[in-house]
Image: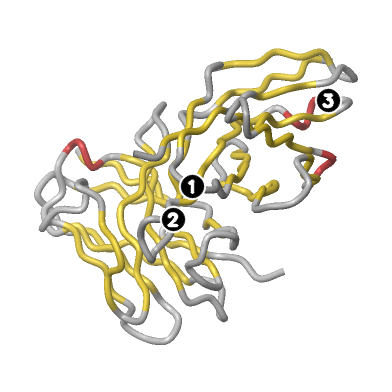
Amino acid sequence: EPEVTQTPSHQVTQMGQEVILRCVPISNHLYFYWYRQILGQKVEFLVSFYNNEISEKSEIFDDQFSVERPDGSNFTLKIRSTKLEDSAMYFCASSEVGIGYNEQFFGPGTRLTVL
Amino acid sequence: AQSVAQPEDQVNVAEGNPLTVKCTYSVSGNPYLFWYVQYPNRGLQFLLKYITGDNLVKGSYGFEAEFNKSQTSFHLKKPSALVSDSALYFCAVRDMNNQGGKLIFGQGTELSVKP
């Protein structure tokens, strides 16, 4: 069964450093998402991406964040200058289309720890 | 604004007993509702969804959910709980106001099934 994969599973970085989180969505999916979950809190939407551009972004997704689909398979989230409060589990998700009734499939997540 | 609420942080059930995990929603228009489960150190796994039609929706692992429009609820149920059902459960609603269709999650309910 196809699945969303994410690398690395755990990333430790120093405050102020840049990190890139990588995702490989399911191959025939067209919509891609990043969510994050701070420890003990709910899952929060960051950004959605379709047709090589951002469809929607949350207020969390400020200028420090960017997303890219550099080739036909990878989908990346970059944080330019990490802050302590960026420590969270980051989930990538994909869906076949963006209309309401399609479920999103989630990857296993990358745990980002900012020291 | 669209939102989802899970009124219980934790639900404790004895194995073999029925379980219910509660969810209420607030949306404008028709809701597209989802349940996801998160096992420790894992991503979110899709359980079931309500789009339209029958109010009782059946999903994976013997779970079902009942959509109640008058009570704006979408409670997750299982007739006979297993110890292996112990996990974190998230209710979510699809945002139909934007093309990307992000998911808006509840805060999660930790289900503990004891032998």
Q: From the image, tell me which residue sits under label 2.
A: B96
Seen as rendered, the residue at the extreme bottom is: A72
How many numbered marks are there? 3
Give the x, y percent position of residue B78.
81, 30
Mark 3 neighbour class, 10 Å CA radius: few under 14, some 14 to 19, many 20 or more: many
Left or right placement of residue B22 versus residue B59 in this view: left
Left or right placement of residue A15 versus residue B12 in this view: left
Label 3 chain ID = B
Left or right placement of residue A11 versus residue B30 in this view: left
User: Which sits in the foreground, A3 or B69?
Assistant: B69
Disc nearer the start of the sequence (2/1)? 1
Numbered mark located on residue B29 in the image: 1
Q: Secondary structure at mark 2?
A: loop
Q: What is the spatial separation of the Cα atoms under label 2 and label 1, in whole angstroms?
A: 9 Å
Q: From the image, tell me which residue sits under label 3.
A: B81
Numbered mark located on residue A28 in the image: none
Residue found at x 61% / y 25%: B71
Indicate the amino acid at tag 2: Met
User: Which sits in the foreground, B91 or A22?
Assistant: B91
Mark 1 neighbour class, 10 Å CA radius: few under 14, some 14 to 19, many 20 or more: few
Position of the C terminus of chain B by quadrant: top right
Q: Are marks 2 and 1 on the same chain?
A: yes
Disc nearer the start of the sequence (2/3)? 3
On screen, B50 above or below B20?
below
Q: Secondary structure at mark 1?
A: loop
Indicate the amino acid at tag 3: Ala
